[in-house]
Amino acid sequence: MIIGLAGNPNSGKTTLFNDLTGSSQYTGNWPGVTVEKKDGKLKGHPDVTIQDLPGIYSLSPYTLEEVVSRQYLVNEQPDAIINIVDGTNIERNLYLTTQLLELGLPTLIAINMVDVLEKTGVTIDTKKLEKELGCKVVTISALKGKGTKEAAQEAIRLAKAHEVGKRPEIFSGHLLKAIQEIEGKLDGDMKRWFAIKLFERDNKVIQDNNLNPDLKNIVEPIITKIEDEEEDDAESIITSARYEYITKLTSQCVVASKKQAKSLS
Ligand code: GDP
Ligand code: K
Ligand code: MG
């Protein structure tokens, strides 16, 4: 069984990888430490491989890190994903989360840096996040080794049960209809993710995944219709919809204590 660690740069992937595998890969508070993926065995579980992936902000094909991570997630398909979210930067990190959940793989969200959150008095309503995102959410401190074993156990359980959560509905109205129309032309568990990528004119997915090359022309009128309505380009339309969703979600799920609210004012 393979469990992939996916998340933003500096979210703590390598720290978690070291904690789970007992290895000592280099960690550091700057980007670009991991460009290649690295794997190791979960301590006490010789049958479970943990795969550390390059840090990414999205599943676009623009940086080497994005290409390596997305190729792995889409083509090799780990049995489960642990999506590490930097809890001190939750809004920015959830942008990737919304994309990972579209892959249709068993996914656990591990909100990291809970030690820092405790100090600053920020509480994250994980139950509410679970309900809204449709998948399991836990909090961990990779650095202190807090909650990490439990997170790995939960990922193993999701992988064994092939438990894919209920996908959150990030898009609505005409945009959702357009995505669904494209999805209708595709097959397989990842068709929602492919449909969104095709809507964004990310034609590398056609090449990389042996999709019908005619799809590019077939979906073009669906895309331009929405672009004309929204007076914006397809990629920006998708990005805006994600951020709108995340802003609403975090306003409901992230609570700053009075102490913190005071120190911010
Ligand atoms: P990666 O880029 O996702 O692999 O992140 P790293 O594992 O290299 O961690 C980035 C920085 O965050 C390092 O300085 C880590 O020590 C620090 N870090 C990781 N996890 C935690 C945590 O749970 N709490 C705190 N306070 N720092 C953490
Ligand atoms: K790093
Ligand atoms: Mg790393």
Image (cartoon, rainbow, N blue to C red):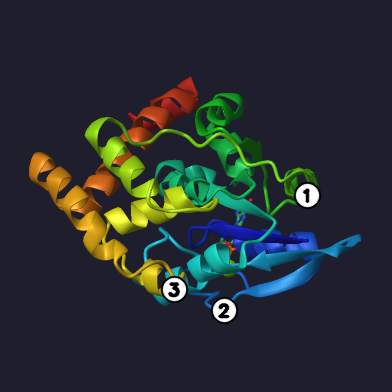
Q: Are marks 2 and 3 in contact (CB under 8 Å)?
A: no
Tell me which amino acid carries mark 1. Answer: Ile
Q: Quadrant of the C terminus?
A: top left
Look at mark 3 in the image and give the residue it sits on.
Answer: 208
At x 53%, y 63%, the residue is 74
Residue that mark 1 sits on = 156
Residue 97: assigned label: none
Q: Does dot 3 land on a helix, a strand or a loop? A: helix
Residue at the (54%, 56%) spot, across then down: 11
> Judging from the image, what secondary structure is the residue with disc 1 in?
helix
Cα distance in 3D space between marks 1 and 2:
24 Å
Q: Nearer the viewer, mark 2 or mark 3?
A: 3
Figure quadrant of the N terminus: bottom right
Which residue is painted at 76% across and 50% down in the image? 152
Q: Position of residue 205 (x, y in %)?
A: 39, 67
How many residues crowd mark 1 within 10 Å: few (<14), some (14–19), many (20+)? many
Ligand 3 has an atom within 8 Å of the beta carbon of the residue at disc 3 = no
The answer to whether the residue labelled 3 contacts the one labelled 1, judged by CB atoms less than 8 Å apart, is no
In depth, the one of 173 and 36 nearer the eye is 173
- Residue 143 placement, left or right of 90: right
- Mark positioned earlier in the residue sequence (3 or 1): 1
Q: Are marks 1 and 2 in contact (CB under 8 Å)?
A: no
Mark 3: which amino acid?
Asp
Q: Position of residue 203 (x, y in %)?
A: 31, 68
